[in-house]
Image (cartoon, rainbow, N blue to C red):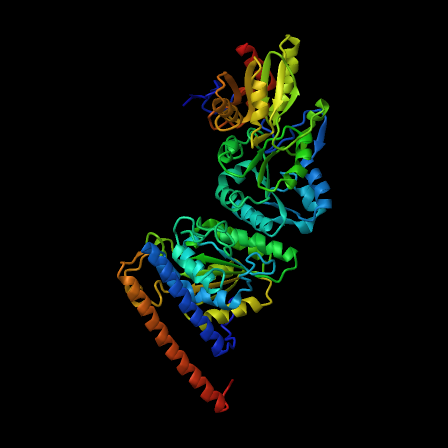
Amino acid sequence: MSVKSEHGTAIGSAGVSTEKKLVSGAMSVDLAKEGQRAVQAPLGQALLTAADRDDRIVGLSADLAKYTDLHVFRDAFPDRFYQIGMAEQALLGAAAGLAMEGFVPFASTYSVFATRRAYDWLALDIAEPNLNVNMVCALPGLTTGYGPSHQATEDIAILRGLPNLTIVDPCDATDIMQAVPQLIAHDGPTYTRILRGRVPQVLDEYGYEFELGKAKLIRDGADVLIISSGLMTENALEAAKVLQQDGVDVAVLHSPTLKPFDSEMVLKEVARDRLILTAENHTVIGGLFDSVAHELALEGVTKQVTPIGLPDEFLDAGALPTLYDRYGLSVAKIVETVRGRM
Amino acid sequence: MTTEFRHTTISPERIVRVREAAFRIRQNALVEAEVQGQGYIGQALGFSDVLAALYADQLNLDPTDPEWEGRDRCLLSIGHYALAIYAALVEAKFFPQEELKTYATDGSRFPMSAMSTYTPGVEISGGSLGHGLPIANGMAMGLKRKNSTATVYNLLSDGELGEGSTWEAAAVAAHHELSNIIAIVDFNDQQADGKSTTMLSMEPITEKWESFGWETRRCDGNDVEAVLANLIELRELEAPRPRVLIVNTRLGKGVDFLEKREKLHFMRVAEEEWSLAQKQLHNSFADESAETDELREKERSTTEDGGRA
């Protein structure tokens, strides 16, 4: 029997094609490209700085400290770290209990597990009593080629409906390191989509500073506005450089806090007469695009917005560059989408 | 890990005090339930002896300061035992007696399911089962960090043992040697769809907890003396292990016609039956008190005879 795969590659009965292909990376690969400015374990580093000054900070993980950069904290403060084992419900419950006793827990696992496996604990133990628990979760959206079991393509859609919860989708090491003290100071629950390992450093070049709850204009442009979050801000900025060469002037508005959403800033930027797109590392349902559309509808603004984001599908396994191209998230594909809309 | 039940010597006065408290908690629960005409009255009556042992004896609490830092934390996973917990909190002077009649009415501090956001003295918002023990772990970790001597109690139901998170948390508590946790499992063999043991039997329950590394005891949950003795012993143990007491309770205990009625998770009681319920409760308490008096008399005579004290 011979089947034609969805992506057009003919697969023979042996299931082997001779074409040279990219190979899926490890479960979690470094996002920083060769030669790019990057910071090693920005979450871990920022937590060390904060924990040195603040005894209330404790760490917990469900067998993924090493893969969420919480091992940096664990190794420096072993008596302030709780290994919960592969038990995400118990992880979030324990984090809630510690917060009730006055501590400020950072609980880590992968995004899929915190949201899909332990949602009831996140909702009822942490969000409802409005506790200062900070969930720092790796592999957000499409950041692994491992397949749907590890791709948190709808984590924001799951969480946006939860009252009290602050949701952060950082772009780079600058965002993560500046966010940590603000997450601690914020007296309520937070969920942050962590980038781990060698994380690119991008936004500091633009004189940017992270502010919880605020969207920031990273670069201005007269023709196009891309509203972005997470690692898509980096891609949007790269795409803007490429389009600049064609004489297309692109503004990038980075909105790392998805909830509460900075509607004021977004509406202000949308008001100018430009082509508008959103760019997010998340399904186009229930994330940044929907947040923007929601604000426009409430305000009675009738403008077309083009979403760049993951499709409403369970994604393929594969090499990240292949998948970013396939699903339209790569710099080249953003450029193509913008040109197509001009 | 289960040691032979060692009978802690408890004075008859102490037992009588707890029995009287249990009687009043039952009275309180009936007053609340009458407002609605229905509810989880079977569980409240069945669990009153345990609640009396806790709220009238074991728990260090300050009704004038429900968030007192030194208090024992009593976490009610089973939000549907709201009737019972309010009845106990009224007995412990957290609320005036009159407030019982506000139960489940709009604007009341006593909603149908017990929630920390509504009721001082209620530590967590239970209701979705399998949350109490995971939270208890975090509180126990936090209390140890603060060198507190407070104990975290978690009241669970037999049906709640079906939730996987309970067992995740049981493993975590043992691994982290959270000896400042005492869980109490109310085994009344009744859940929404029928008898627990015929639906998803968790027996042998005692062995399960033991194998998870817990100090485990099981007793008749309507025997005040046994409950008290076990709770005292579990609290005093030196073992670096979390503790659990499984109590077998009778739904409707203390009200004869409710004990005999078809066993139901959620009971309806007719309007004219409430006064009968209070009457039967009085009668069974009077019988129990007579027994206690007899025992006390016997004990005194043996002591006077030079028998063991």
| Residue A17 as seen in the image, left or right of residue A25 | left
| Residue B79 as seen in the image, left or right of residue A155 | left
Residue A230 location (% of width, % of height)? 60, 28
Residue A60 location (% of width, % of height)? 61, 46
Is residue B289 in view from this perspective? yes
Spot the residue most to the top.
A247
Q: Is B305 located above or below residue A122 in the figure?
A: below
Residue A39 location (% of width, % of height)? 71, 31
| Residue A163 as seen in the image, left or right of residue A138 | left
Q: Is A67 located above or below residue A125 in the figure?
A: above
Is residue B198 in view from this perspective? no
Q: Is A319 located above or below residue B178 in the figure?
A: above
| Image quadrant assignment for residue B86 | bottom left
Q: How many marks?
A: 0
Q: Residue at x 36, y 61 (%)?
A: B31
Q: Is A24 located above or below residue A252 in the figure?
A: below
| Image quadrant assignment for residue A46 | top right
Q: Nearer the viewer, residue A246 or A294?
A: A294
Q: Nearer the viewer, residue A170 or A260?
A: A260
Q: Residue at x 73, y 45 (%)?
A: A53
Residue A229 location (% of width, % of height)? 59, 26
Spot the residue most to the bottom.
B305
